[in-house]
Amino acid sequence: EAQVTQNPRYLITVTGKKLTVTCSQNMNHEYMSWYRQDPGLGLRQIYYSMNVEVTDKGDVPEGYKVSRKEKRNFPLILESPSPNQTSLYFCASSERRESPLHFGNGTRLTVT
Amino acid sequence: QQPVQSPQAVILREGEDAVINCSSSKALYSVHWYRQKHGEAPVFLMILLKGGEQKGHDKISASFNEKKQQSSLYLTASQLSYSGTYFCASPVPSAGNMLTFGGGTRLMVKP
């Protein structure tokens, strides 16, 4: 089954403790991206990748890192999480730039 | 600048129709529409790539007026399963597959 898999689904952590949210897609898609969704602010872009080793910032990249060492994986790294990064995170992939986005099921992160 | 959607929320009875509008102050080269149910990921509905294009899927269709920088989503004879939040989105130029999403329209269909 074609899918984007994010893990974990829920994560509660403390300020400053490094964490990684994994994202993997099995559709051989070139493009991958990360969004965060907050009430009243909608979906906002964090980082995107156009191919292996090609990544760039979206609108709200501060406090996040990404890597794309393999085509299928696009992890989101929070080196030193802070409470303002409490949010619902979505990974998405697409075949081409103008193709539909396939979203993962989301990761609800709480930083205390 | 994110696209602006209207209305922000709408309540319908089953079988009624609804229109959701999306407009942008920037040029719109294409428009995506997604639906998100509570607690779930957004799900793709359709893309309109060209001005004047209209698309339909079941009883949900959309139009795209490139000159007016607007798109509309039409839900006909709504069903309970149509409930959710609808987002329009436009590609970010030179930014991979990044989309700028509108603020969303919350649609509730009641029996």
Image (tube, grey):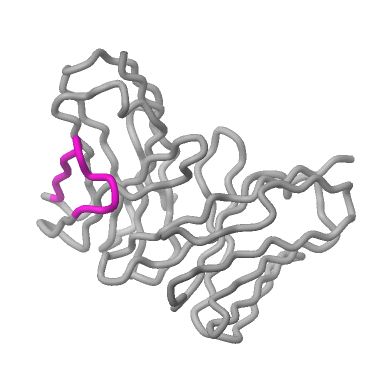
Q: Nearer the viewer, residue A43 or A100?
A: A43
Q: Nearer the viewer, residue A5 or A17?
A: A17
Q: Nearer the viewer, residue B16 or B21?
A: B21
Query: Split into 4 quadrants, where in the image is the C terminus of chain A?
Result: top left
The percent position of residue B107, horizontal first and vertical second, equals 72, 47
The percent position of residue A1, horizontal first and vertical second, equals 44, 50
Was residue A65 drawn as part of the magenta stretch in this picture? Answer: yes
Residue drawn at the location 51% of the way across and 39% of the way down: A40
Residue drawn at the location 55% of the way across and 59% of the way down: B4
The percent position of residue B47, horizontal first and vertical second, equals 52, 70
In the image, residue B63 sits, relative to residue A81, either above or below, namely below
Q: Is residue A29 left or right of residue B11?
A: left
Was residue B28 drawn as part of the magenta stretch in this picture? Answer: no
In the image, residue B45 sits, relative to residue A20, either above or below, namely below
Q: Nearer the viewer, residue A78 or B55?
A: A78
Q: Hey, which quadrant is residue B37 in on the image?
A: top right
In the image, residue A107 sits, relative to residue B69, either above or below, namely above
The percent position of residue A80, horizontal first and vertical second, equals 15, 24
Q: Which residues are magenta?
A: A57-68
